[in-house]
Image (tube, rainbow, N blue to C red):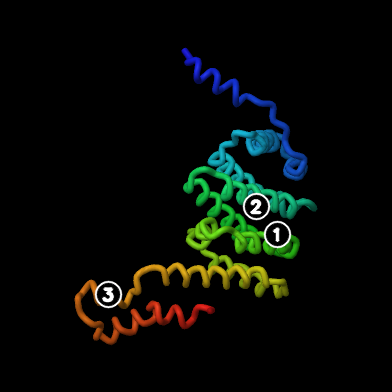
Amino acid sequence: MKSEALQVNLESTRVDVTVDDRYHILLEVMDRYHGVKDGLQVLLEEICHPYRNWGYIVKESRSYALNYFHVLKAHPRGPEAARLYADIFFQAVESARTWDVKRDAADNLLFFIQHIVRNAEDDLSSFSPLLTYVFDRIRQCPEDIFHLFVTSFYQLTSLAGDVLNTLRSQETVADILALNRLLEHALQYTYGYWLKQADPWSWFEDLHDAKVDEPQINDALREVSHRQLMRIKKP
């Protein structure tokens, strides 16, 4: 038998949900796939619910964004729909209450972008504005959120390599300014992060209570020392 407190809670969270008009593009793109469209409708209702479950949203959005990318690629409004999926992941990164869900959202956003770059083929130019939008928005994230992208399993440097390899293979010229700015910001952030940690050189000497005098160790520590980081980090 349900407790009175539980019943009151259920009543308070039972609301009529209207899917925001901006998400109708996703339904339009999946219009031919009726069973899939029904499941997508459930996801969109959850996204628009005032007591949304971000863990569920991230998991399901990943599934629709990746498994049906071939549909996005073939549809005239596919790039618009792809941007909505990106926005959903950004919403989760910014609004989820737990850092596990935030990290999962950041990882899946980068994985989705990687998937687009690797699978868009001749249609990559159609998704180029989306890539610029995502790279710029990641760069502008607050430091705690930006940290999730810098430390993601899907590394920004690897993603940049995928972009450049795809452009070369297609002999395509594209605007990569946003990507360059993101990489520069990520490097500056990384240098700053390690400069706040103990200097590896000093740490090693303190650990062994002796000066570093082995040439190989000396050379290895020099490359990651605070002095070296300060040298390559912009003022």
Q: Residue furthest left?
A: 209
N-terminal of the pair, mark 3 or mark 1, is 1
Q: Secondary structure at mark 1?
A: helix
- Spatial CA distance of label 3 from label 1 is 45 Å
Neighbour tally class for label 1: few under 14, some 14-19, many 20 plus, Cα within 10 Å: many
| Percent x, y of residue 119 | 64, 60
Neighbour tally class for label 2: few under 14, some 14-19, many 20 plus, Cα within 10 Å: many
- Spatial CA distance of label 1 from label 2 is 9 Å
- The answer to whether 204 appears left or right of 233 in the picture is left
Identified at 61% across, 44% down, the residue is 61
Identified at 51% across, 46% down, the residue is 101
Q: Nearer the viewer, mark 2 or mark 3?
A: 3
Q: Residue furthest top?
A: 1
Residue 205 visible in the picture:
yes
Is residue 164 positioned above or below 63 on the image?
Answer: below
Name the residue carrying label 2: 86
Identified at 38% across, 78% down, the residue is 225
Q: Secondary structure at mark 3?
A: helix
| Percent x, y of residue 50 | 63, 34
| Percent x, y of residue 121 | 69, 63
Name the residue carrying label 3: 204
Name the residue carrying label 1: 130
| Percent x, y of residue 65 | 64, 48
Depth check, front residue: 184 or 32: 184
Depth check, front residue: 93 or 26: 93
**Residue type for callout 3:** Phe
N-terminal of the pair, mark 2 or mark 3, is 2
- The answer to whether 77 appears left or right of 86 in the picture is right
Kindly indicate the quadrant of the structure image that contains residue 172. Answer: bottom right
Depth check, front residue: 182 or 233: 233
- The answer to whether 22 appears left or right of 190 in the picture is right
